Image (spheres, rainbow, N blue to C red):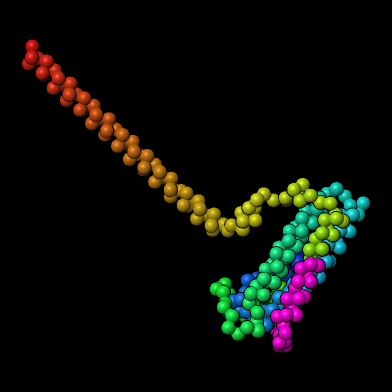
Amino acid sequence: MGKDECKTMLDALNKVTACYRHLVVALGSTSDSQNLREELRKTRRKAQELAAANRTRLTASLKDKTTTKDDRVEYERLWVLFSSNMDLLEVDMKRSLELGQDFPLKVPTRHLIATGMTGSTTAVAARAMSVQNMKYEADSNVDTADLRELRTEIGQVSRMMEEMEMKVQVAPWAVEAKQEPGAELKSNMSVGDSSVGVISICDEEPKEDEAGEREAGSGTFCAVLVFAVILLVAGVLGYLVVSMS
């Protein structure tokens, strides 16, 4: 149950951090609004709560002397995934800070950026945090307060990562992956796509044979032509020799 619990918690963290990244992309776009900023704040705090829970659970499991060798290998793999997730979260939080500074909501004539994002982003955050119909009250000082909180939280995430590395000595390069690179993509290929690929390959093979036959025919014609020219030159030379004698 320990490993299953860790996997479940890590999966929840992955979903929330992915949601946060999706929301960050909308900053400064036509989808930017006070609701978006509030959703970003709620989502990143939810991610930090899950991160703290994951860190506590994984740290306890890795420091447990009774953990079997096989279980420790699995916990180390989860730890590496967790660390990578935290790195991405910190990067997105810093990006959110920069965009929030460049595109303050209180400036009505700001220049929007073309992100391709349109419409409301509330549903995305709601699905990630299991909350429906998220609505927030207006706050005239939302920019200043939120950016100040965001700076503080970025520092907290950085310190959390430093403490993680000090408490648990896990070398990422020493952890072996359970699947080969690209295994996820291969497993997602449908049978129909595979059939189409096979059909395409089968269709291409006769074309290659036909091309080979054409090349072989061209080579034979060239050889005959060269041989005929040689015979003609030999005949002319023979006639000249006979005439001169």
Q: Nearer the viewer, residue 82 or 113?
A: 113
Residue 111, position as x, y percentages in the image? 57, 78
Is there any visible trace of residue 19 in the rendered image? no
User: Does 74 sit left or right of 143 as displayed?
Assistant: right
Q: Residue furthest top?
A: 245
The residue depicted at 50 percent of the width and 51 percent of the height is 198
x, y (%) of residue 6? 81, 61
Q: Classify residue 99 as left or right of residue 175.
A: left
Q: What residue range appears in magenta?
A: 131-156
Quadrant in which residue 122 is drawn: bottom right
Frontmost residue, 58 versus 167: 167
Please identify the residue farthest to the right as the structure is shown. 65
x, y percent for residue 163: 84, 59
Find residue 236 and report its image quarter: top left
Image quarter (top left, top right, bottom left or bottom right) of the N terminus: bottom right
Within the image, what quadrant is residue 39 found in? bottom right
Q: Is residue 76 visible?
A: yes
- On screen, 48 above or below 230? below
Q: What residue is rendered at 76% in x and 68% in y?
A: 154
Residue 41 drawn above or below residue 213:
below
| Magenta span includes 136 | yes
Say whether residue 234 is left or right of residue 111.
Answer: left
The residue positioned 77% from the left and 47% from the top of the image is: 174
* Above or below for 222 versus 166: above
**Foreground pick, 109 / 92:** 109
Is 8 contained in the magenta span? no
Q: Where residue 177 sits in the image (x, y, percent)?
A: 72, 50
Quadrant of the snapshot with the C terminus: top left
